[in-house]
Amino acid sequence: MSVFSLFAHLVERLADLLAPLCHGSATAAAIVLFTALVRLLVHPLSRAAARGQRARAALQPRIAELRERHARDPERLRRAVLELHAVEKVSPLSGILPSLLQLPAFFLLYHLFSGASGHSLLAHRLFAAPLGGRWADALADGGVLGGAGLVYLGLFALVAGVAFFNYLRAKIQLAQNPVLTGAGGGEEVPGLGAVGRVMPFLSFLTLVTVAVVPLAAALYVVTSTTWSAVERAALYRRP
């Protein structure tokens, strides 16, 4: 049995357990619950990422001093910042690598809920919307205010709310850590500043994802992004 078949079997068993409560939408509810359970399993990696980011944030006052001292020599500033991280045993990428280690689980789930490996799951529905269908199918079958269209409107509203919440948090984080955008000269990691400047807007790409993938995959994406927003709000809250 492949990993995909095993995961699909587990989701089907969850759906059987939820059927008395959720009826025809039990499989959709099982996808949401299974996604949350997987996110719970990888939560220790999220905590490690938060610790790494806090360690980097603690160095910001000293980095600001280095930036002032080497304002006219960006290359020397870059070397000094890297040396500071080495002395304090804080990687410039701490907080990033634990997040990257979570990606295989996320890709696996996305593939399960969007590809042929999850065909038995895609045959079910969330209310009037087939889990194997897309927003374009909903528009063709009843329009925006049809049964399936209303399901997507609900998902879009939730995703937009989460994206705006993430946007505000990212703006605050960048204001508190200007080194992420390379403000004032120099970057901890070459190219990180450009990523930092576009980061607040990335959450809104989830709207596009939900619109083009099968509904089962959209439920996974919505659940995972909502979990991430709540998790980050808890892990990165200021003391």
Image (tube, rainbow, N blue to C red):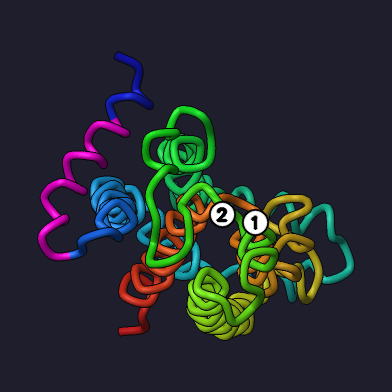
Q: Secondary structure at mark 1?
A: helix
Residue 219 in magenta stretch:
no
Q: Amino acid at mark 2?
A: Leu
The quarter of the picture where the N terminus appears is: top left
* Residue occupying image coordinates x 59% and y 75%: 177
Residue in the picture at 46% in, 48% down: 99
**Segment colored magenta:** 7-21
Q: Is residue 115 above or below residue 161?
A: above
Give me the residue at 51% from left, 47% from top: 132
Percent position (x, y) of residue 139? 67, 68
Mark 2, residue position: 84
In the image, taking residue 239 as reference, residue 20 lies left or right, namely left
Q: Are marks 2 and 1 in contact (CB under 8 Å)?
A: yes
Drawn side of residue 190 relative to residue 123, left or right: right
Q: Hey, which quadrant is residue 58 in on the image? A: bottom left
- The front one of 173 and 126 is 126
Say which amino acid is labelled 1: Val
72 and 128: which is toward the camera: 128
Q: Is residue 150 above or below residue 108?
A: below
Q: Quadrant of residue 120?
A: top left
Front residue of 227/143: it is 143
Look at the magenta stretch and give its main secondary structure.
Answer: helix
Q: Is residue 222 above or below residue 43?
A: below
Instruction: Name the residue rendered at 27%, 26% in the picture.
Output: 6
As drawn, is 186 to the left or to the right of 84? right
Category of crowding for the residue at label 1, using alpha-carbon neighbours closer than 10 angstroms: few (below 14), some (14–19), many (at least 20): many
Q: Residue furthest top?
A: 1
Q: Position of residue 234 (x, y in %)?
A: 31, 75
The residue where tag 1 is placed is 81
